[in-house]
Image: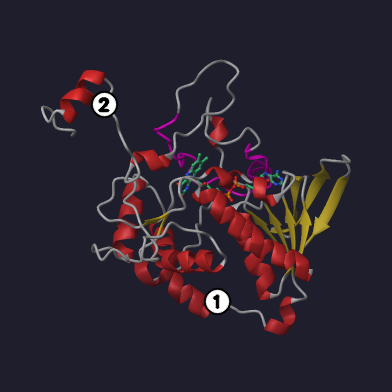
Amino acid sequence: MVLDSKIPKGPLSEKWTNHKNSINLVNPANKRNIDVIVVGTGLAGGSAAATLAELGYNVKAFCFQDSPRRAHSIAAQGGINAAKNYQGDGDSTYRLFYDTVKGGDYRSREANVYRLAEVSANIIDQCVAQGVPFAREYGGLLDNRSFGGVLVSRTFYAAGQTGQQLLLGAYSAMNRQIGRGKIKMYNRHEMLDVVVVDGKARGIIARDLVSGKIERHSAHAVVLGTGGYGNVFFLSTNAMGSNVTAAWKAHKRGAFFANPCYTQIHPTCIPVSGDHQSKLTLMSESLRNDGRIWVPKHKKDAEAIRAGKLKPT
Ligand SMILES: Cc1cc2nc3c(=O)[nH]c(=O)nc-3n(C[C@H](O)[C@H](O)[C@H](O)COP(=O)(O)OP(=O)(O)OC[C@H]3O[C@@H](n4cnc5c(N)ncnc54)[C@H](O)[C@@H]3O)c2cc1C
């Protein structure tokens, strides 16, 4: 077994830029002859489907919910990081790269993290253009908060519902392409298998969850944006439907399962209240940082603070 992450060669900060500069392009007139299947319509799949369709490819998009708006991305709260340095507090692509590698316990693929840091600024611009209502200062400029213990303020947020607002942005971009006929949307469809021809994914088998009918769909390429596998743990902040079935099917067809230690821990969940609970509810991430208002646990401390006898630290 050869593990090949296919990260391009060259110095770390140039690997993906060089690759993008030398990759084969598809002639604009030929894009309409190429079909792409995108499974999953959360922030990953939804934005991929909208972008591919905007470029001119014919996209078939699948999700098991009744609408792309129900993808679990809707649960994300705290915000999205971008090295725009709007606050002038010394942020840079390198610092976002460094903080992300550190936050990933030094296990992330560094070249990919560098790329993430590099394109982070463009993603904010794209989301704003799509109408995502990020929080703004009173003067109208985009606001940032410091998040996750980093030394700069680079988190763009929309109250405590950033994921929901981002998903509505991606969904609107998808809807525009559905209206143009460039995306054919298959809601309530569950991918059951990947069809592999000569080592390449060329289609999927799906079940129509309303009629139960099993369907075949073919394409030149298949993109899986089917979410994480947090539900392997007893309780998770993922919905029970986020059950990683699509990635598991791809794994059974030969795709390697990389870095299974890669799970984000949510430390601020509301304590479990009983056996009936199937998932954990995240306390608003807004409470963890700039937006928080902590109050003393004991009345006597509140009174002492008011009387100036105790410092509220
Ligand atoms: C409570 C919570 C708070 C979070 N807060 C933040 C935050 O503040 N900042 C941040 O950056 N990240 C945050 N995250 C993480 C972030 O939200 C997720 O990593 C991201 O949204 C995942 O997007 P996705 O598109 O990969 O998956 P999802 O949004 O889960 O979408 C998966 C899609 O795949 C489809 N699908 C899955 N299996 C199949 C199948 N077999 N057949 C057909 N379709 C299938 C689903 O229908 C769905 O459309 C948070 C996550 C949670 C749970």
The residue sitting at the front extreme is 307
Q: Secondary structure at mark 1?
A: loop
Whole-percent x, y for residue 87 in the image:
29, 63
In-image side of 99 versus 190 (left or right): left
Residue 205 is covered by the magenta coloring: no
Nearest the viewer among 101 and 304 is 304
Q: Amino acid at mark 1?
A: Ile
Q: Quadrant of residue 135?
A: bottom left
Total count of labels: 2
In-image side of 138 versus 180 (left or right): left
Residue 266 is covered by the magenta coloring: yes
In-image side of 236 versus 182 (left or right): left
Q: Which mark is residue 296?
A: 2
Whole-percent x, y for residue 238 in the image:
56, 36
Q: Quadrant of residue 60?
A: bottom right
Is the residue marked 1 within 8 Å of ligand 1, measured from its CB?
Answer: no
Q: Residue at x 59, y 25 (%)?
A: 278
Mark 1–mark 2 distance (CA, rounded to whole Å): 58 Å
The residue stretch that appears in magenta = 242-269
Which colour assignment does the render follow?
secondary structure
